[in-house]
């Protein structure tokens, strides 16, 4: 019983996360903004979920900003941003990601690209219908007309 209580106490202690808001800014970017482009909101409150805050390992505001903006396809800068100190040593940034819809791509892939991938020794073809995040996209399979999720690392662009 003592061991169980000790283990439970340690799990609770480890799972406790301290998040302290250390700043608010109207706009934050570490990239040059093109005044000739028409930017729009791509997503709101990006980077602010408890899960995303726990995963933050950025040591600088620039790294935290890059991590939040790059998760969103086409993201360029943050508006209405909040900066957090996580567990006294890591930085996290939350905000509305703005960007240009015409520039949405990840790792060279964009919506409408024809791709191929291999699964269980067989090759499949399809069309990218959505860029989900910085790791995966949604593809409409040509043979089954089903939508599947694939890692960018597992697909190859075809012509």
Image (cartoon, rainbow, N blue to C red):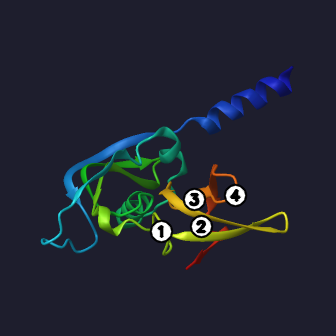
Q: Earlier in the sequence, mark 1 or mark 2?
A: 1
For the residues labelled 2 and 4, say whether their Cβ atoms are less than 8 Å apart.
Answer: no
Mark 2 to mark 3: distance in Å? 6 Å
Q: Is residue 124 above or below residue 92?
A: below
What residue lies at 20% left-to-right and 56% top-to-bottom? 27
Mark 2 to mark 4: distance in Å? 20 Å
For the residues labelled 4 and 1, say whether their Cβ atoms are less than 8 Å apart.
Answer: no
Give how far across and how far down residue 55 sits, in percent.
54, 50
Mark 3 to mark 4: distance in Å? 20 Å
Location of mark 3 (residue): 136
Mark 1 to mark 2: distance in Å? 8 Å
Mark 4 to mark 1: distance in Å? 25 Å
User: Which numbered circle lies on residue 152?
Assistant: 2
Give how far across and how far down residue 120 sits, in percent.
84, 63
Give how far across and how far down residue 33 sits, in percent.
20, 71
**Dot 1: element:** loop
Judge from the rendering whether residue 128 lies leftward or rightward of residue 60; answer left or right. Answer: right
> What number of labels is visible?
4
Q: Earlier in the sequence, mark 2 or mark 4?
A: 4
Disc number lying in front (2 or 4): 4
Location of mark 1 (residue): 106
**Dot 2: element:** helix
């Amino acid at each position: 019983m003592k061991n169980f209580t000790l283990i439970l106490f340690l799990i609770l202690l480890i799972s406790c996360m301290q998040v302290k808001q250390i700043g608010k800014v109207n706009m934050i970017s570490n990239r040059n903004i093109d005044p000739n482009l028409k930017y729009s909101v791509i997503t709101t409150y990006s980077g602010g979920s408890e899960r995303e805050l726990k995963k933050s390992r950025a040591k600088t505001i620039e790294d935290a900003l890059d991590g939040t903006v790059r998760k969103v396809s086409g993201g360029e800068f943050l508006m209405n941003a909040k900066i957090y100190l996580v567990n006294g040593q890591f930085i996290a940034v939350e905000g509305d990601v703005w960007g240009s819809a015409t520039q949405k791509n990840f790792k060279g892939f964009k919506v409408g690209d024809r791709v191929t991938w291999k699964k269980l020794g067989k090759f499949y073809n399809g069309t990218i219908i959505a860029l989900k995040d910085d790791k995966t996209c949604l593809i409409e399979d040509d043979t089954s007309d089903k939508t599947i999720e694939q890692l960018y690392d597992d697909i190859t662009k075809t012509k």
